[in-house]
Image: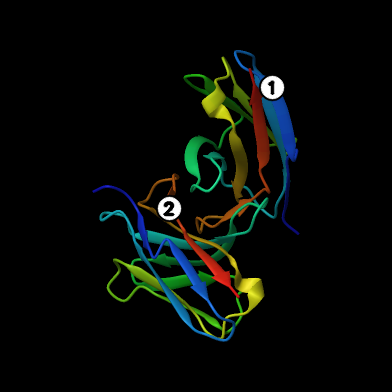
Amino acid sequence: DTGVSQDPRHKITKRGQNVTFRCDPISEHNRLYWYRQTLGQGPEFLTYFQNEAQLEKSRLLSDRFSAERPKGSFSTLEIQRTEQGDSAMYLCASSHDSNEQYFGPGTRLTVT
Amino acid sequence: GQNIDQPTEMTATEGAIVQINCTYQTSGFNGLFWYQQHAGEAPTFLSYNVLDGLEEKGRFSSFLSRSKGYSYLLLKELQMKDSASYLCAVRADSNYQLIWGAGTKLIIKP
């Protein structure tokens, strides 16, 4: 396994459109996390899965954001009716009963 | 509230030693992490402390004092490739969610 992968790496969309990102974690990892990061800031927690169960969702996450991990493997993050403030790097990380989270390369979203 | 503070930017010389500090105020504590992040790339894990004391890993060491809510990352024999942002993160409870600082941008000069 080569690590956590994310697709696409870059996405440019117009305000009001919906976008979906995919994350494939390291295969034996049961925990999966989504973060958002803007320039000069640390990652901001969005949501967390243990296997297929979404155990926690940030209060900062509006109803426009939804995430799934249907089979406990890959995960998708959808943003509906995108706004310019959604422009950021979206990071996925995974871990397996350990302390270390392994990050994917991220998806950079630009909303015009 | 949850808060993690670290300096915004530091400058050091190649071959020297630099210490990056992190202070935290969180509702609980279940471990502190340091990550390195090069510009435009994802964070990569450096160290983990859950008990007081110093953890050494090659050129990098990390220290924790839980009573003071304080940690530092020590980088020795600095190399130009160490130019990056260094992120401090705290796990406040047992659900594995991390609370992140804004990161310290380290600039290495020849």
Chain ID at mark 1: B
Which element carries disc 2, helix, strand or loop? loop
Task: Give left or right: position of A91 versus B21.
Answer: left
In the image, residue B10 above or below residue B13: below
The amino acid type, in three-letter code, at marker 1 is Ala
Q: Position of residue A112 (x, y in %)?
A: 60, 75
Question: Which residue is under mark 1?
Answer: B12
Question: Which residue is under mark 2?
Answer: A105
Q: Position of residue B46 (x, y in %)?
A: 50, 34
Dot 1: within a 10 Å radius of its alpha carbon, few (fewer than 14), some, or many (20 or more) residues? some
Viewer-side residue, A64 vs B84: B84
Viewer-side residue, B25 vs A92: A92
Viewer-side residue, B85 vs A32: B85
Residue B92 visible, this angle? no
Query: Residue drawn at (63%, 17%), measured in percent from left and top?
Result: B110
Q: Quadrant of the N terminus of chain B?
A: bottom right
Query: Residue drawn at (60%, 68%), measured in percent from left and top?
Result: A87
Query: Residue drawn at (46%, 63%), measured in percent from left and top?
Result: A10
Chain ID at mark 2: A
Which element carries disc 1, helix, strand or loop? strand
